[in-house]
């Protein structure tokens, strides 16, 4: 049993005990949706970051970890088409870490990202622990009935993705090979839009990819536009990898999908380094996780009002939703085959 099998089992148990008629969507989506009074719904998400599993202290500056802790939860709220408003954070720290400036640096990065999106830190908890454990909770709002779910894609819908794919996974591989974010670079933030013309060296590409891994940029603006304008029929953020997250969306919607390999927005920095750093751009785009881009579907009738860029971030049309029996397929030129889910799992065999 992997974690997704366990979550499905737990969802059935929770549904049998659902005592709240205000719960619109619970276990199985990027966030829970709860009906509020008036014309608003509350959207809530939580994420865990565990030292030596989700990050390593020696490769992750504390302020970037603070940024990341909030970013991963903001991405979940964006995937629901909601506006983030409040945050809670709890963490456990070893005594030696508490006595350092870790906590101050952590919250410098956390609050800088919160300020960018107008998110209020409302509370949390602190405890002593054997390793760093971070629990991030973000809540937001959406107009009643406007939350974008994983379960509402329809055959014929077109599949889109924001930004580029494979950069974060490439950054992780570079870290494993010994690359480290520079002191100057660690104060900058990867914005997902590539490099400027005068930043084309391998060193710049490496630093950019490291920041894609260590300081992901949640697509909050895109999420709000897709939700408020009712443009997306379904949505999920890419945390485990395109091949896995697309399969999650299809399973919840009882549909299939076909993806065109040539349409995938491969990260330009990965393509620049691939020959010298043993990076496979297509494999990283398909199966590498933690890009935190938005994967969403749009009905043919809503394609014309769909913007091409939001907050400077573009989108790519990568495929089409098909009938349930079609499975998830990958097309490359004249060939087509089943796309296996090879993204990240905590407890997979």
Image (cartoon, grey):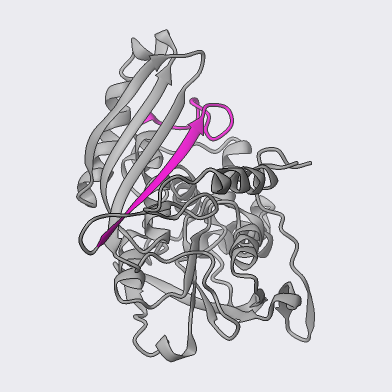
Please give the name of the residue rendered at 40% of the width and 38% of the height, measured from the top-left corner: 69
Q: Is residue 20 magenta?
A: no
Q: Where residue 207 sits in the image (x, y, percent)?
A: 45, 47
Please give the name of the residue rendered at 52% of the width and 60% of the height, measured from the top-left corner: 269
Q: Where residue 308 sits in the image (x, y, percent)?
A: 37, 80
- Residue 228 quadrant: bottom left
Q: How many marks?
A: 0
In-image side of 4 versus 95 (left or right): right
Residue nearest the observer in this picture, 155 or 261: 155
**Residue 245 seen from this side:** yes
The N terminus - image quarter: top right
Residue range in magenta is 40-62
In this view, 97 is above or below 253:
above
**Residue 215 seen from this side:** no
In this view, 155 is above or below 265:
below
Q: Is residue 52 magenta?
A: yes
Residue nearest the observer in this picture, 225 or 53: 225
The C terminus - image quarter: top right
Please give the name of the residue rendered at 52% of the width and 72% of the height, measured from the top-left corner: 152
Q: Where residue 202 sits in the image (x, y, percent)?
A: 51, 53
Please give the name of the residue rendered at 40% of the width and 53% of the height, measured from the top-left corner: 21
Q: Where residue 42 sits in the image (x, y, percent)?
A: 31, 53
Residue nearest the observer in this picture, 10 or 171: 10
In this view, 6 is above or below 218:
above
């Amino acid at each position: 049993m992997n974690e997704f099998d366990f979550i499905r089992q737990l969802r059935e148990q929770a549904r049998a005990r659902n005592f709240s008629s205000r719960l619109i969507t619970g276990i199985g989506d990027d966030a829970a949706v709860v009906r509020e009074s008036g014309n608003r719904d509350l959207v809530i998400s939580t994420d865990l970051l565990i030292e030596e599993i989700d990050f390593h202290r020696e490769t992750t500056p504390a302020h970037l970890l603070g940024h990341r802790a909030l970013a991963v939860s903001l991405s979940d709220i964006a995937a629901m088409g909601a506006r983030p408003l409040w945050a809670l954070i709890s963490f456990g720290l070893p005594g030696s870490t508490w006595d350092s400036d870790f906590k101050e640096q952590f919250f410098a990065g956390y609050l800088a990202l919160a300020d960018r999106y107008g998110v209020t830190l409302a509370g949390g908890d602190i405890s002593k622990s054997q390793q760093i454990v971070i629990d991030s909770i973000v809540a937001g709002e959406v107009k009643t009935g406007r939350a974008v779910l994983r379960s509402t894609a329809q055959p014929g819908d077109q599949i889109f993705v924001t930004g580029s794919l494979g950069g974060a996974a490439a950054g992780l591989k570079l870290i494993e090979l010994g690359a480290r974010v520079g002191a100057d670079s660690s104060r900058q933030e990867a914005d997902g839009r590539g490099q400027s013309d005068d930043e084309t060296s391998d060193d710049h590409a490496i630093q950019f990819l490291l920041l894609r891994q260590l300081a992901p940029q949640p697509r909050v603006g895109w999420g709000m536009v897709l939700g408020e304008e009712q443009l997306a029929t379904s949505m999920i953020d890419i945390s485990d990898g395109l091949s896995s997250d697309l399969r999650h969306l299809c399973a919840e919607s009882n549909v299939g999908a076909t993806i065109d390999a040539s349409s995938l927005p491969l990260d330009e920095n990965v393509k620049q380094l691939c020959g010298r750093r043993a990076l496979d751009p297509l494999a990283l785009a398909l199966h590498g996780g933690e890009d935190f881009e938005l994967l969403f579907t749009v009905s043919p009738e809503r394609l014309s009002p769909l913007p091409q860029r939001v907050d400077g971030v573009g989108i790519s049309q990568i495929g089409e939703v098909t009938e349930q029996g079609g499975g998830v397929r990958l097309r490359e030129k004249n060939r087509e085959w089943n796309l296996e889910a090879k993204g990240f799992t905590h407890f997979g065999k």
